[in-house]
Amino acid sequence: MKRVFEILTASLICLFVQDTFGQVEPDDSTSLYYAIQEIIIFGKGSDKGLINRVSATQIQNFNKHNVVEAVNLLPGVSITQLGARNEGSIMVRGFNSLRTPVFYDGIPIYTPYDGTFDLSRFNTFDIEGISVDKGLVSVQYGPNTMGGAVNIISKKPIKKLDINGQSGLISAKGDAANGYFSSFNVGTRQNTYYALGSVSILDRKDFVLSNKFEPTNSSLQDAGKRNHASSQDIKLSGKVGYTPNETDEYSLSFIYQNANKAISPNVLLTGNSNWRDYPVYDKKSAYFKTKTLLAEKTFLHVTGYYDTYFNEMRQYDDNEYLLQNKNSSFSSVYDDYTFGGIINLTSEAIKNNLITFSLNQKFDVHREHNREIAERLEIEQNFKAGEPVQEYNDHTFFVGVEDVIVLNSSVKGILGLSYNTRRNTKAQEYGTHYNTGERDVLFDFPTGSNQTFDYKGGLVVEPVDNHKITLSASKRTRFASQKERYSSRFGSQVPNPGLKSEYAWVFDLTYSGEIGSLFHYEVSGFVNDIHDAILVRTVGELDNGNPINQNVNIGKAVFQGYELAFEYDPLSFLSVGANYSFIALKDKTGNDEKFIDVPNHKAIGYTKIDIPKIKSAFLASIEYYGQRYMTSTGDEAPDFALLHAKFSVPVYRGVSLDLRVRNLLDKDYYLALGYPREGRSFLTALSYRF
């Protein structure tokens, strides 16, 4: 297999890339509409983005319906499915979503307690693009960008009447329709204002496994449909904006996401920890953004936001998903909110300097409890008492400055400095007091705080037109989440309120270029040197012999690798493209710790053929993933490749029909140990734009 992979990689490097991977940015006139939502290092210059940006065109061409699937089109990004909670998650150059925060129009969207969010719940029907910053990261993102930053950019109207959307069905062998989706976006852009409204639904039933899946005698999964795998996501969003002149803009937006999702059992395990679901998984957001010209070449950007998160996770006694009588069964409620503000001031008042000053404050409130379960004699459900609400409060403050210095016509220097601090003001728990041993009491943990400085420096060299070299080094920090500091994990973990931040020195060298207008390429190499990493240490033993753990700052590691991306239009009707990434994750603590969920190799390639006579197009693509560790002790998942094909044809003015088959060879594969993925499936969709 290794030899086959080497040949495949060489072929990809010699061949690929274009249209779909090339359409990464709107043209200049369109990009102006999104300036208020993008996060960039002002003055650094624009990037073609072959390795760090995916566009709405790509998302639709590949029919990626959620953010996890869409961002996976980029090199250096790997995806995983956190099976026990059915959460889609991404890894950027080895850093998980705790260390690589996700933003929506520049606003952080993680939940206060966990520090992450299920990105599979974010569908892509109202998204214009997704950027992934890996090397230099703007101070405008604020704190916690140790692994980089991911920014989801929402759609805006660009015409007087702007209507688009799509609807379709998903099916598989033996199941006529196990999913459907529909979206509708309507907006208007006038001389001094704009407005947009969006609605979408994505409904998935229990998907069908590969015919090659072989259940064992002890397996909790039969062949055919995946048990308890359904989900439904409904999203409403809207925005209004005021543009009084060519420089200023003021907008107000809201997002309402309603989801419920089942959690499939691990096919390798037994016990009621498998029998879970999320009947409610909701997120609501409201935010405003402004851009004002204060003086010549001096802008003030102001952002304010308020988010709420509400979800309920239920654990049941057995696979009937009905009774909750066992001590280990529960209904856990999270009722969280967060609010904050961001101020960015940019100025070119000093000749040959573009200075950005950023101020960022965020307040996180987490409230949780196990709710009361009522007695139901007809099903033999016993009464189970609930808990009082426990609350955790964090205040995060960030101030930073960066300067892009024009050294000469082809060289720019970048310098940056920031100060970050996080202070906990309340942390409550209900259960056995960690000090006195008293049972069933509500108590307070000690509060704590942490602060740190971060730095960055870089050079941007453009020796000739359409060729650019970027060299950078930066120290980036990540504060421990509330969960890492305070969770007791049902008595198996000792809280650590004084847990400190972890940090990494990030080194990046990227070169992008063009040959004519037909061939574009980008190459990037990186080294991430990680210090004070938060790892689990065993500090005791339970009565049943299981370990008692604690999160501590003891880890050291190096993540290093490279990424390649190409695009090529050899003929007017033919486009080919690909990207490839390699990463090596090395533990430096001496414990031979294995880093999970990140394949050592990843390659994506495609060929797109336009058929002018019938005004249609054919797209074939391949995804290859190398071996990855599934557990920190060394259990590995084998490499695998997925083939996909799509045929598109116009139906009527602005309306087109898509026919797509995913996992064409019906590969049996998994991203998390014990959680097999979907086999061959088919998509039929109508897309429209007026």
Image (tube, grey):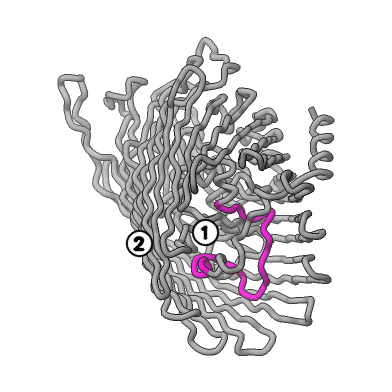
Residue 162 location, quadrant: bottom left
Q: Which residues are magenta?
A: 33-56
Q: CA distance from mark 1 to mark 2?
A: 25 Å
Q: Relative to the observer, which residue lies in front, 106 or 278?
A: 106
What residue is rendered at 20% in x and 20% in y?
379
Residue that mark 1 sits on:
479
Which residue reaches farthest front?
A: 613
Q: Is residue 42 magenta?
A: yes
Picture residue at 69% right of the left edge, 35% below the top:
624
Q: Residue 38: horizontal and vertical position, in percent?
A: 54, 65
> To which quarter of the image does residue 32 belong?
bottom right
Closest to the observer: 213 or 684?
684
Badge number at residue 286: 2
Nearest-to-viewer mark from 1 and 2: 2
Q: Secondary structure at mark 2?
A: strand
Give, as a three-letter code, the residue at label 1.
Answer: Phe
**Image point 41% across, 70% down: which residue?**
190
Task: Please provide percent x and percent y for residue 363.
Answer: 38, 64
Query: In the displayed structure, would residue 198 be above or below residue 595?
Result: below
In depth, the one of 236 and 352 nearer the eye is 236
Please state if 256 lies on the left or on the right of 63 as rendered: left
Q: Are marks 1 and 2 in contact (CB under 8 Å)?
A: no
Mark 1 Cα within 10 Å, few/some/many (few <14, many 20+)?
many
- Residue type at the position of mark 2: Ala
First in sequence: mark 1 vs mark 2: 2
Q: How many marks?
A: 2
Q: Do we see residue 564 in this rendering?
A: no
Label 1's element? loop
Q: On the rendered structure, is 22 left or right of 246? A: right
Q: Quadrant of the N terminus?
A: top right
Residue 459 on image: x %, y %: 75, 71
* Residue 256 sits inside the magenta stretch: no
